[in-house]
Amino acid sequence: MKTAVVTGGAAGIGKALVLRLLEHDYNVVCGDIQPITGIPTSLQSRLQYVHCNVVTSDLPSLFAFAVRTFGRIDVVVNNAGIAEPGAFLSDTINMNAIKRVVDINLTAVVEGTRLAIRQFQHQQSPGVVVNVSSMSALHPLSVAPVYTATKTGVLAFTRSLKYLRKRHIRVTAVCPFFVDTNLLQTSKQGHDPVFTALLDQVPRVTVTQVVDTIMQLIQGETTEMELTVAPESKL
């Protein structure tokens, strides 16, 4: 039985993915700062929750726990992420808030990918990493330049690891358009009314669409390194 590690797995896209993986008979280790709830009893035996702040030593501990518990790791999804903390030029934003976006959205993805690859190599087995980027990596958001920078970095970082395919390790990325999650609601905070009104009007993709796409990457149903998830009108 394969084992997957999912960061940011307690809500939104992450939780939906955890459920899908359990339904596909994976063992799943969910790392998040909040516990995961609402999992059917019939699936709970293959799920382990670990408190994980991805910008601390919790992240390598998450991987060590997965190996101790299930003996191996086959899939890693670096999903944890946060929104930009308000308008970039606002007087209320400080560098610590900006640094936190970079640390969670980019630095933790780099470390999570490295930990995954090292584990696959140690096992001498194939493995898959899915890094959650964003459509903003392809179409930059002027209202969220730091978020855009981090997601662009995730995509470029992922592309740079294409050579690992020769070693049967696939590092991939998914780039969703706006998705109805708590993250989208958080992104409205601190922005001007014009922006929030615009955000309410743009088309959305569903969590299910994003999870379907991630599963395509995990299961090798595509040879692409990256897949976008966009409303039909935006394709």
Image (cartoon, rainbow, N blue to C red):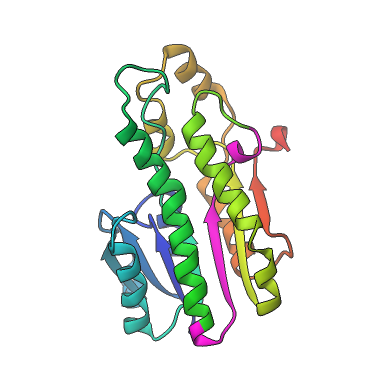
The residue lying at 30 percent from left, 35 percent from top is 96
Span of residues in magenta: 122-139
Q: Position of residue 71 (x, y in %)?
A: 39, 86
Q: Is residue 95 above or below residue 17?
A: above
**107 or 23: nearer the viewer:** 107
* Residue 10 is a magenta residue: no
From this view, report whether residue 58 is shown above or below residue 104.
Answer: below
Q: Is residue 184 left or right of residue 204?
A: left
Looking at the image, which residue is at 55% across and 24% down? 142
Kindly indicate the quadrant of the structure image that contains residue 56.
bottom left
Q: Position of residue 140 (x, y in %)?
A: 60, 31
Marker count (numbered)? 0
Query: What is the quadrant of residue 15 in the picture?
Result: bottom left
What's the residue at 69%, 68% (across, down)? 163
Residue 4 in the image, given as x and y percentages of width and height? 45, 72
Quadrant including the C terminus: top right
